[in-house]
Amino acid sequence: MNRNLMTQALKKLEFFYPNKISSENFLRIMGLKSSDKELGKIIEYLEETKKIYIDKSKSGVFSQIKRNYMVPGDMVKITTPGIDFLNKLDEISVEKNKGNAITRATIVLALVGFIQAIVYFEEFSRGIRDGYDWSALLLIGITLFAIVVIMTSPFILNSVNEISKLKHFKPYPNQ
């Protein structure tokens, strides 16, 4: 079942909520000429899970038949569980995007911190060799290290949390 087509169908129906739209208009809005096999599976799933409601009373003879396709005269409407389902999908995609952004930012900050550490140790060794006061350089180095640790700790904690959620992960061998 095509998940993108299913969410697209629900979003189109949500636009018309709380009104019903005819099956002809629904297919036209979806950009289809007729109800194909894939859309039939999606409609059947959405109707069984009560995410959409199809009023088949105006479709004449076809109203008595159990079917997974729409005929002219059917009226389609999204239900509250369908809207809740869409909201949950949006929340999941936002969380996923946020997690990806945090991961990218953490990697960039870790690389910047690594480069700063290399530059710092080069200057620190040059300062000791030339006889500079190394306490100021040490303070700068500790500060840079603390910044890197603070910036990378959310990524590390998130990774540890995700690993511990895995079903096959056992921190102790006797579990």
Image (spheres, grey):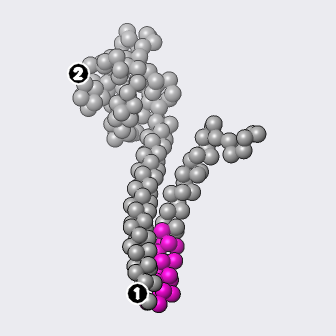
Above or below, 63 against 97 in this view is above
Q: Which residue is pictured at 59% across the width and 51% down the height?
A: 161
Which of the 4 image quadrants contains residue 87? top left
Element type where label 1 sits in the image: helix
Magenta stretch: give its range: 132-148
Above or below, 10 against 69 in this view is below
Is 28 placed left or right of 66 in the picture? left
The N terminus: image quadrant: top left
Which one is earlier in the sequence, the residue at label 2 or at label 1? 2
Q: Amino acid at mark 2?
A: Lys
The answer to whether any part of residue 52 appears in the image is: yes
Q: Amino acid at mark 1?
A: Asp
Q: Which residue is pictured at 51% across the width and 27% down the height?
A: 49
> Does the magenta-highlighted stretch encompass residue 30?
no
Nearer the observer, 67 or 41: 41
Element type where label 2 sits in the image: loop
Residue 174 on image: x %, y %: 76, 39
Prevailing SS of the magenta stretch: helix
Q: Which residue is pictured at 46% across the width and 36% down the height?
A: 82
Numbered disc total? 2
Nearer the observer, 55 or 149: 149
Residue holding disc 1: 130
Q: Residues within 10 Å of mark 2 (few under 14, many from 20)?
A: few
Is 140 placed left or right of 161 in the picture? left
Residue holding disc 2: 33
Residue 7 on image: x %, y %: 38, 35
Residue 133 on image: x %, y %: 47, 90
The C terminus: image quadrant: top right
Which of the 4 image quadrants contains residue 132? bottom left
Residue 135 on image: x %, y %: 51, 87
The answer to whether any part of residue 25 appears in the image is: no
Q: Which residue is pictured at 25% across the width and 24% down the height?
A: 32
